[in-house]
Image: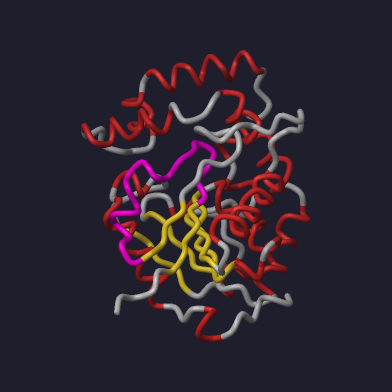
Amino acid sequence: MGTPEVPLGVIHGRLGLVHFFGPHALLPRIDVHAPDLPGYGSEPWPGNGDALTLEGQAGWVADYLRTRIGRPAWLLGHSVGGAVAMLAARMAPELTQAVISVEGNFTLDDAFWCRRIAPMRDDEWAAEHARMQSDPRTWLANGGIEPTPRRLEWAQVILQNQSAATVHAMAKAVVQETGDPAYLAAVRDVLDRGMPLHLLAGERSCSGWDVPAWARSAAAGMVVLPGVGHMMMLEAPERFCEAVSSMVLAAPSQADSGNRFASA
């Protein structure tokens, strides 16, 4: 009898999509869900005229947990997706087994790129975004990533997956919402209620990750992948998935231990 699949929702960052490297094949014992958030890829921006927000994205993820997964799942959030994952876990604790924050945003110190582009005029940012899309080699080099053929192909996919308007809107949302003291209060509330948190970072970038001492103390553990930076799944997808698999498969499931978050 095979090992039951553990559901894992993967939430991408400000430059969207995580499924470019084939996590489903690299995590064969895990039921991987890696959707585009609203405004990214094939998922449309809501047509009601509302701005994209972290709270709104988290609400979409919570609905995805209820309607597409339908059982308690792990949530993994990369970069801005880490903030979305924490907020989604707060909205749907009964459907969240644990959170893996992959250099996820905790404070404005984690939002240096968003803080730079948020105040830019739309036309200024659109021009910069177009330059970035047309030159994936430089984008990789700026991240200290060697531009191998496979990485160049993946970088092109990542850069083309969202419009300039989406990235600009998300940058503004990150600055506004993670800069509000209510955001960290919400994160602390999630951890105080007993939600397991796992931290995953790259060796080259972990020193710049502003994890509050209380969050680090509450975490079940922190794994630092050697020789990689913030885009670790692009640099070393196999090692990234090994780390994720170790976290998910080593932990007891809520089915085994009872869903202690259902009434949180």
Indicate whether residue 13 is drawn in magenta: yes
Indicate whether residue 80 is drawn in magenta: no
Q: Quadrant of the N terminus?
A: bottom left
Q: Is residue 45 left or right of residue 6?
A: right
Residue range highlighted in magenta: 11-29
In percent of the image, x 77 and y 54: which residue is there? 181
Q: In this view, does 12 lie to the left or right of 156?
A: right
In percent of the image, x 32 and y 45: which residue is there? 21
Q: Position of residue 120 (x, y in %)?
A: 65, 22
Q: How many marks?
A: 0
Q: In this view, does 238 lie to the left or right of 263?
A: left
Q: Is residue 131 left or right of residue 127?
A: left
- Report the residue that reaches farthest toward the bottom: 257
From the viewer's side, name the closer residue of 186 and 205. 186
Q: Position of residue 157 (x, y in %)?
A: 38, 31
Q: Position of residue 114 (x, y in %)?
A: 60, 36
Q: In which quarter of the image is residue 69?
A: bottom right
From the viewer's side, name the closer residue of 127 and 5. 5
- Report the residue that reaches farthest toward the front: 1
Q: Tell me: residue 240, above or below residue 122.
A: below
Q: In which quarter of the image is the C terminus?
A: bottom right
Q: Please, which colouring scheme is shown?
A: secondary structure
In percent of the image, x 61 and y 73: which residue is there? 195
Q: Quadrant of residue 137?
A: top left
Q: Position of residue 102 (x, y in %)?
A: 47, 56
In percent of the image, x 61 and y 63: which residue is there? 212
Q: Quadrant of residue 51?
A: top right
Q: Tell me: residue 128, above or below residue 100.
A: above
